[in-house]
């Protein structure tokens, strides 16, 4: 029997405690061996069999760790990932990949030099609603797509005391939720021709952007990506219009809520979404009919299953770092667009 891959998790904040630790523990062939945290009591309470390291450096130095997961504040992603790669570890980085394009390119080059796997946790590729929309577009039920709108709206009027809302580099919704929405758009449509971003601080005492509205141009297709922390009555999660019909989907994927409640895959009905797609389709005579379509189940464990198989079997990386680099390039263009109030041309260099 092949020995499991020993995984070391850097940080035990929200992303680690809610997503990474339980997902890693759910995958046969992965062993959550060590966690670095300044709150050892929290780690021991949740994962009593994991060793607690006082610092990320202490964990990275452990000879028994095969894979390091970097789930620390955004401004530490690049230096910690670089340390882990230099120590000969395979590395998963939580989104956003880095703070800027240069850091992302440097990490990709370092991973190639070290001949180690580097991947980015764009887990929302495995949201059930996104998988369902992706499948519907693949069936061409809506004809040629002309408008795609993706919202990630919540009502969180009180600004929490955490680094994500601190106003420091890498904080704010554009760095937090922008990577999710951009990655999904790239999976569906590829790179846009242009991008424009508007953003704002709307909550009382906000120190970082808590509202953004991005517009991506693809010939006649327009893609709207929107997020807000002050939306008490949310818009549809997805709105898609095509030449032969429309699709709407309300409600967020259920996996984050389930993980926060302490449920773990493969719990019964894992990833099932009670909110179906609503399709309005035109017949040959232009008569409109409506029907609902059940959502495919979401499954974030597919990411870490892919990581295990990529390391052990040489299978494809579930999120190659080059794809995450494109997200960072669009994040950077969005920053310039918002700061200068202009539409940015997406003229990215070719791979290689």
Image (cartoon, grey):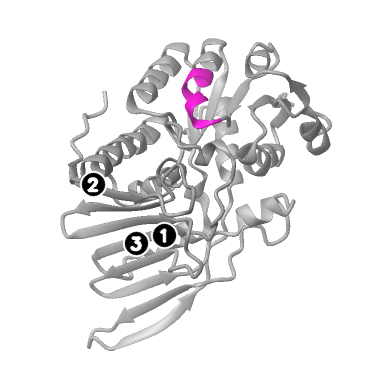
Determine which residue is flagged by label 2. 195
| Label 1 with label 3: CB-CB less than 8 Å | yes
Q: Secondary structure at mark 1?
A: strand
Name which residue lies at 29% across and 42% down: 334
Q: Secondary structure at mark 3?
A: strand
Name which residue lies at 42% across and 12% down: 113
Is 246 displayed left or right of 319 in the figure? left
Label 1 and label 2: CA atoms lie apart by 17 Å
Q: Secondary structure at mark 2?
A: strand
**Disc marking residue 54:** none
Task: Give the dominant element type of the magenta stretch: helix, strand or loop.
Answer: helix
Label 1 and label 3: CA atoms lie apart by 7 Å
Residue 134, horizontal then vertical, whole percent: 40, 58
Residue 265, horizontal then vertical, whole percent: 70, 50
Name which residue lies at 63% across and 43% down: 19
The span picked out in magenta is 73-81
The answer to which image quadrant residue 319 occupies is top left
Judge the density around disc 3: few (<14), some (14-19), many (≥20) Cα neighbours within 10 Å: many
Q: Give the answer, above or below, for where 277 lies relative to 84.
A: below
User: Which comes before the other along the chain, label 1 or label 2?
Assistant: 1
Quadrant containing the C terminus is top left
Determine which residue is flagged by label 3. 149
Determine which residue is flagged by label 1. 151
Residue 57, horizontal then vertical, whole percent: 63, 14
The answer to which image quadrant residue 328 occupies is top left
Nearer to me, 84 or 317: 84
Q: Give the answer, above or below, for where 195 lies relative to 322.
A: below
């Amino acid at each position: 029997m092949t020995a499991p891959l020993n995984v070391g998790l850097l940080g035990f904040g929200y992303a680690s405690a809610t997503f990474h630790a339980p997902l890693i523990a759910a995958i046969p062939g992965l062993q959550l061996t060590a966690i670095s945290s300044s709150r050892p009591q929290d780690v021991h309470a949740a994962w009593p069999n994991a060793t607690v390291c006082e610092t990320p450096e202490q964990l990275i130095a452990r000879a028994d760790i095969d894979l390091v997961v970097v789930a620390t504040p955004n401004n530490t992603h690049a230096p910690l990932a670089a340390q882990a790669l230099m120590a000969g570890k395979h590395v998963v980085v939580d989104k956003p990949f880095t703070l800027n394009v240069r850091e992302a390119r440097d990490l990709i080059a370092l991973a190639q030099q070290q001949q180690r796997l580097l991947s980015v946790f764009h887990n929302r590729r495995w949201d059930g609603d996104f998988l369902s929309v992706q499948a519907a577009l693949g069936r061409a039920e809506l004809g040629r797509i002309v408008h795609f709108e993706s919202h990630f709206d919540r009502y969180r009027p009180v600004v929490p005391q955490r680094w994500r809302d601190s106003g420091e580099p890498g904080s704010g919704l554009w760095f937090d939720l922008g990577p999710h929405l951009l990655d999904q758009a790239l999976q569906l449509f590829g790179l846009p021709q242009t991008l424009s971003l508007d953003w704002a601080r709307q909550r009382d005492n906000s120190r970082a952007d808590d509202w953004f509205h991005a517009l991506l141009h693809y010939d006649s297709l327009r893609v709207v990506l929107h997020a807000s922390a002050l939306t008490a009555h949310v818009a549809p999660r997805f709105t898609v219009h095509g030449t032969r019909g429309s699709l709407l989907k309300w409600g967020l994927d259920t996996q984050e809520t389930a993980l926060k409640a302490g449920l773990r895959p493969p719990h019964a009905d894992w990833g099932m979404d009670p909110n179906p797609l609503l399709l309005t389709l035109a017949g040959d005579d232009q008569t409109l009919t409506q029907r609902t379509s059940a959502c495919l189940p979401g499954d974030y464990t597919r990411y870490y299953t892919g990581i295990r198989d990529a390391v052990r079997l040489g299978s494809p990386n579930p999120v190659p770092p080059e794809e995450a680099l494109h997200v960072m390039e669009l994040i950077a263009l969005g920053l310039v667009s918002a700061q200068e109030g202009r539409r940015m041309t997406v003229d990215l260099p070719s791979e290689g």
